[in-house]
């Protein structure tokens, strides 16, 4: 994988109702994303409930995803682990199984130090051939990476090809990163956080989306309009779907898995314990929101956004 | 103040460029809200940068707000303090100066205990004649109040008239609170969090808005449509303004203060250190967003939302 | 394992200088503890840097420890994992490899709820035959378990045989737990936190030590004196070694590993990245402290505390 | 105040049983410390429950302390406040009332940035004539100040005369600070954290104690022996009193206030809500510990440590 841009969905890890892996649904998801023409997929991120899997399950997920995506889509694999050696081992496994890149986030230390974060990335980069995506998501990592640190990482570690910019306020941070990156080798920036700040991030230089919003078609349309210079169309698309984006990015992955189920992509909306499943009231509210957002629409088919 | 519902804006505390209090702008704000016909105002909340004021400045703000609001609007005063006795003293000051109610949030303890939170509210209630609004905002307080605890507070402390529900996911928590409150005396629920989940909170039973979104006219229109049973209109209004709601609720109060300045309501957008002022890039992005949201509109006048 | 009391050291995971597992040193450690006559050992706790190991490495550690301990010592295995199913799988592996019990700590949730913690333990207990040790260590888990919750766990989940009480202030919490446990089936309480509050915990009812302090002989002597009613001797032993206890429990595991190296029990004091190794100044200070605490003593031999 | 070294106790704020200020007991405390010959006192720190006082109460405490200390002891005043302007105002009040120096800690920001912390200190220093003590206590501030940042503060802000080093591990951080400070103007380092690492901090270069341990005589004796080069005596004194130091530094201020009460220095051991008072079991355990540490000793008199 040479470059990381466009729409690269974060893939949920589907479970059966007994919480065992449902690799068939995973393959469905990947095939659906391939059909949409996205630029890649990322597995084993937060939405992928990676922190709730054993290493053996991780391998099964990587293998199934790569096998399904073969020749159609590059697969980026989340490999973050509190131990640097274990992150490296996760990278090796991902590489062996055919991953196109690895997504790496730092873990919190009792006394935060920029140099320790830098060493972490440098050690990982030294032991893998995979390109790296730096995930900057303090809400899940409790690690605050300054613009200076991120620019140093981008400058000094050639394996890094992308920053997934998920630190609020994301638009102004992306603007600062873009400015700092301008003179160096190409490192892209992707928008996460469920696309909550999607339009604003694009305006500030984001190169695309790397998030789990369950309608990647919408993100493709927004990005397409933005790249064609049709700012009004991008804004209109963003606005129209923003209630759904807001509703979906509520904490947890239950709402998103319910949408994927309603879209016919996964068999069960099960979330692994201690994560909570969707409650009936929220499911009902979601249903009404989907009906209002996509009236008379078969959600199991790729959306036709009328562009 | 007998009941707490409708649209009750959280009021910013305006500063001059040297960070001193600008009470003239504060009066402007209050008068503007009165002209809009809101049901009240809340001063000295998070948006009011209450934590950055001395006690003497708090008094000046309360006095100026109550004097301006006199006979037009009830003034709710944020009184939270890490010490229970000091919270009580803040209540006394607010009461003496003519406040209509007090907003109270708990503070974090080394070992969290529900009973300590309960005692906090009970002690405050025992020493003041003011009705109380319970602020449930873990993002700023680091205190997680369960539905059970909130219902116990509502049931056993008659001074409590309202819960400001700002714990995500807010819609499902509001639904649970509403159900639990149904059998008891009337305690209302108000939506905060910059109205990010405004439509969804209303659907779940919220009685109105108690937030700092800088266009209360929009919240009035949404609430009005909702109460008249015009769900589609409410949704349309929410959707149309949601990009602005999302942009505005980014961390910090700088964006909101800039909007208030652009609306001609405050003289300076200054935020008190260590809070950061708005940066030029963000100000530019905001300006474009406002132009797109309200084309050819004089923002210094109350909005005409064409209803 | 029917009961959990006495001195049960937490075992470090030794690494070679390249950070690979050093199972030979692990066997040394286990043999040494067996020679001391401790009541068991706990592997894969915080001192064991369990969070920095892959699952495959965990298995190697468990296997090596159980093989070495065979017939001499029960081995308790830390199995905590952010996912409940994965914790269960860790339990299964431990059970298959011959563990005597499993130590389980909860993981933090976005919205803390006692019932989720209870369900976690209940699910684990339902799927394993191993007795369970509940680790109550908010400093590492960010989960605050109230006395009420711990008593409910002890009462309703028969698999639980022990609470490792590491929530400050530990003496008063242990006293409250002991009182609550008195009427029920036997559940023991063990002292952790590097034995910092060792004497005080014993006075409040602790049944022994489950901590990584690198001189278990000292803890054995303190506990022995305490159980024989020789409070003065226990106090004198605690006092004499307290500077070392205090020094050793500084954050991180580097100091402890250096002591184990000086005792000839592990070949390298290496800590896995991002954990920091001991710096030369601290190593020098430790050396002087050891000389002062144990003058003219061969630390590679079990201590003779002159009792 | 030109220099900050020796033993400078942190002073508790005594309350009556109804939680009102007990200024008479405060004066008792100050007089007792003066009689001991300490180098100064610090009021309105964490032990002083400063965060639970109104501004008016702060003034009363400062005034009473300075009046009592007049001509005998310099009084350092804790002035930290989440708002920089309010910290400055606290400084002004302290200066006006006769304080000798101000102790200043930073407050946490949503996105931590060293420059904001630096600006905070620089702004405060620019507006006050008081010398400043930088309090580095992440456990209460949630702000991690690196050695680099602290050295920059010491170098660029001449008002800073002392760093209160309370970030664990404190010995190695003090060693690094001392080395960095060596070439510049004199800035002292004082030990806090209840003296838990007292001996180790002194070995690394600490210039004295600035903590609330209720027997400053012990700290004076340890420091005296250390400065005379009698390391063995210092170690013996530290060791003998370490159980009490450990017991006393448990979270909260209740134990310390009970000791001050037992010493006849304050009338009530009351802690302000939501702080918890000492429970009877802990009070009993403390009593036994004091009896064992100081057999047949009248604690209301300055200790005679037999040196």
Image (cartoon, coloured by chain):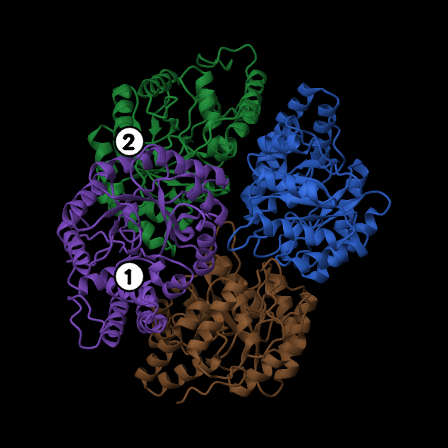
Chain colours: A purple, B brown, C green, D blue
Residue beneath disc 2: C58
Q: How many marks?
A: 2
The disc placed on residue D272 is none
Query: In this picture, is D24 found above or below C291?
Result: below
Q: Is disc 2 surrounded by few (<14), some (14 to 19) or many (20+) residues within 10 Å?
A: many
- Residue A174 coordinates in the image, percent (x, y): 43, 56
Is residue D265 in view from this perspective? no
Report the residue at 41% width, 20% height from top: C268
Q: Quadrant of the N terminus of chain B?
A: bottom right
Left or right of B13? Residue B134 is left
Residue found at x 38% / y 62%: A202
Camera-side residue of D9 and D134: D134
**Residue depicted at 14% across the width and 45% down the height:** A67
Residue B45 can be seen, yes or no: yes
Chain designation of label 2 = C
**Secondary structure state at the residue bearing disc 2:** helix
* Disc nearest the viewer among 2 and 1: 1
Q: How many neighbours does mark 1 have within 10 angstroms: few (below 14), some (14-19), or many (20 or more)? A: many
Left or right, B139 with reference to D231: left
Quadrant into which the C terminus of chain B falls = bottom left
Give the x, y percent position of residue C148. Answer: 40, 50
The residues bearing labels 2 and 1 have C-alpha atoms spaced at a distance of: 35 Å
- Where residue B67 appears, x then y in whole percent? 66, 82
Q: Which residue is mark 1?
A: A213
**Image quadrant in which you'd find residue B195:** bottom left
User: x, y percentage for residue A270?
Assistant: 21, 56
Q: Is residue C288 left or right of residue A28?
A: right
- Residue B306's place in the image compared with C227, above or below, is below
Between C33 and D285, the one lying in front of the other is C33
Work out which residue is located at the far bottom of the displayed protein and give it: B307
Q: Quadrant of residue B71?
A: bottom right
């Amino acid at each position: 994988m040479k470059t990381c841009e466009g729409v690269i969905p974060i893939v949920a890890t589907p479970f059966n109702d007994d919480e065992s892996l449902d690799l068939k649904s995973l393959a469905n998801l990947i095939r659906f994303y391939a059909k949409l023409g996205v630029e890649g997929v990322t597995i084993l991120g937060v939405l992928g409930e990676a922190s709730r899997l054993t290493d053996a399950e991780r391998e099964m997920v990587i293998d199934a995803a790569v096998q399904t995506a073969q020749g159609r889509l590059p697969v980026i694999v989340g490999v973050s682990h509190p131990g640097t050696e274990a992150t490296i081992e996760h990278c090796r496994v991902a590489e062996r199984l055919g991953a196109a890149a690895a997504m790496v986030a730092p873990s919190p230390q009792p006394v935060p130090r920029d140099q320790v974060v830098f060493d972490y990335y440098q050690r990982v980069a030294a032991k893998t051939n995979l390109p790296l995506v730096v995930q900057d998501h303090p809400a899940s990592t409790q690690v605050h990476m300054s613009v200076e640190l991120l620019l140093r990482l981008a400058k000094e570690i050639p394996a890094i090809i992308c920053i997934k910019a998920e630190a609020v306020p994301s638009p102004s941070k992306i603007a600062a990163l873009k400015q700092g990156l301008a003179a160096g080798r190409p490192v892209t920036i992707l928008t996460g956080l469920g696309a909550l700040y999607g339009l604003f991030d694009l305006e500030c230089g984001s190169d695309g989306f790397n998030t789990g919003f369950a309608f990647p078609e919408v993100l493709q349309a927004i990005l397409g309009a933005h790249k064609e210079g049709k700012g009004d169309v991008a804004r209109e698309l963003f606005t129209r779907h923003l209630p759904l984006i807001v509703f979906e990015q509520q904490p947890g992955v239950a709402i998103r898995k319910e949408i994927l189920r309603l879209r016919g992509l996964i068999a069960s909306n099960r979330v692994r314990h201690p994560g909570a499943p969707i409650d009936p009231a929220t499911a009902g509210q979601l249903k009404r929101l989907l009906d209002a957002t996509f009236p008379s629409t078969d959600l199991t088919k790729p959306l036709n956004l009328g562009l």
